[in-house]
C-alpha cells in the first residue's frame, strides 16, 4: 500500500492541486515478466522494451484484493470523519472504483493503474552478470543499476540503485589494485 497527501493524477506526474489523501495497492513483487531486446545492430539505436504488465493474471487478482482493502479502509469511521467526500463522490470524478465488483475494479485498474517507475531485472545477476556485476563472457564490462536485480526489491529502487553503484565502484577499485 502506498499513501500520499494530495490527489494523485496522471500517474503521479501532474502537480497535486486538489486537497485530499491518495492511497492504494501495488504489486511489490511482480510475477509478470517483460523484456528488453536489440532492435538494430547499431550502438545508438533504441532498444525495444516490452513491459508485459499484468500478463500474469494472478497480479490482477492481487491488485483487486488490494483495492478492496483500500476501499474498506476509506469507509472506516476513524478516517471518514476527516473526509469531506465519500467513495461514491470520488468515483464520480474518476479517482475511486465505481464499486467493488471484479468488473468495476478491473475498469479502474485499466484506467488509472501505472507501473511505479521501478523497471529492473533485465541483466539479472546469475543470468547476465556475475556476483561482481561483470557481464558474463566479457572481461571489462560491468552493469551497475537496478537491471542487475534478480528479484525486484519490495521498497522503492532509488536507494538500492545507489548501493549497487557504490558496490560496483568498490569492485572496480579492487580489480585495479590486484
Ligand atoms: C517519475 C519517477 C518517480 C520515482 N520515484 C521514486 C521514489 O519516490 N523513490 C525511489 O526510491 N525511487 C523512485 N524512482 C525510481 C528511481 O528514480 C530509480 O530507481 C533510480 O533513479 C535509478 O537510478 P540509476 O542511477 O540506475 O538510473 P538514472 O537515475 O536513470 O540515471 C541514469 C543516468 O545516466 C544518464 N545517461 C543515460 N544515457 C547516457 C549516455 N549514453 N551517456 C551518459 N549518460 C547517460 C542519464 O541522463 C541519467 O542521469 C522514480 C522513478 C521515476 C521515473
Image (cartoon, rainbow, N blue to C red):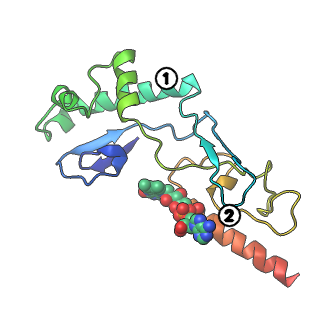
Q: Name the residue under label 2.
A: 144
Q: Distance between the residues labelled 1 and 2?
A: 33 Å
Residue 57, by quadrant, is top right
Question: Could you tell me which quadrant the N terminus lies in?
Answer: top left
Closer to the chain start, of discs 1 and 2, is 1
Q: For this view, does 131 lie left or right of residue 75? A: right
**Residue sitting at x 14%, y 41%:** 82
Residue 61, numbered label: 1
**Residue sitting at x 30%, y 28%:** 71
**Residue 158 seen in the current view:** no
Q: For this view, does 123 lie left or right of residue 97? A: right
Tag nearer the camera, 1 or 2: 2
Residue 168, numbered label: none
Place of residue 40 in the rendered image (x, y in percent of width and height, measured from the top left):
71, 49
Q: For this view, does 141 lie left or right of residue 19? A: right
Local crowd size for mark 2, using a 10 Å CA cut-off: few (<14), some (14–19), many (≥20)? many
Amino acid at each position: 500500500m502506498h499513501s500520499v497527501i494530495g490527489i494523485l493524477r496522471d500517474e503521479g506526474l501532474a502537480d497535486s492541486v486538489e486537497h485530499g489523501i491518495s492511497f492504494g495497492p501495488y504489486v511489490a513483487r511482480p510475477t509478470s515478466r517483460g523484456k528488453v531486446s536489440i532492435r538494430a545492430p547499431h550502438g545508438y539505436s533504441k532498444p525495444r522494451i516490452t513491459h508485459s504488465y499484468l500478463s500474469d493474471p494472478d497480479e490482477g487478482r492481487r491488485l483487486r484484493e488490494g483495492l478492496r482493502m483500500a476501499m474498506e479502509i476509506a469507509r472506516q469511521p476513524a478516517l471518514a470523519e476527516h473526509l469531506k467526500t465519500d467513495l461514491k463522490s470520488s468515483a464520480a470524478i474518476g479517482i475511486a472504483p465505481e464499486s467493488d465488483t471484479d468488473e468495476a475494479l478491473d475498469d479502474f485498474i485499466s484506467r488509472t493503474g501505472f507501473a511505479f517507475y521501478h523497471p529492473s531485472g533485465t541483466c539479472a545477476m546469475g543470468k547476465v552478470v556475475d556476483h561482481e556485476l561483470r557481464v558474463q563472457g566479457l572481461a571489462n564490462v560491468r552493469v551497475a543499476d537496478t537491471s542487475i536485480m534478480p528479484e525486484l526489491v519490495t521498497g522503492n529502487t532509488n536507494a538500492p540503485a545507489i548501493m549497487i553503484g557504490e558496490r560496483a565502484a568498490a569492485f572496480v577499485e579492487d580489480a585495479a589494485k590486484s
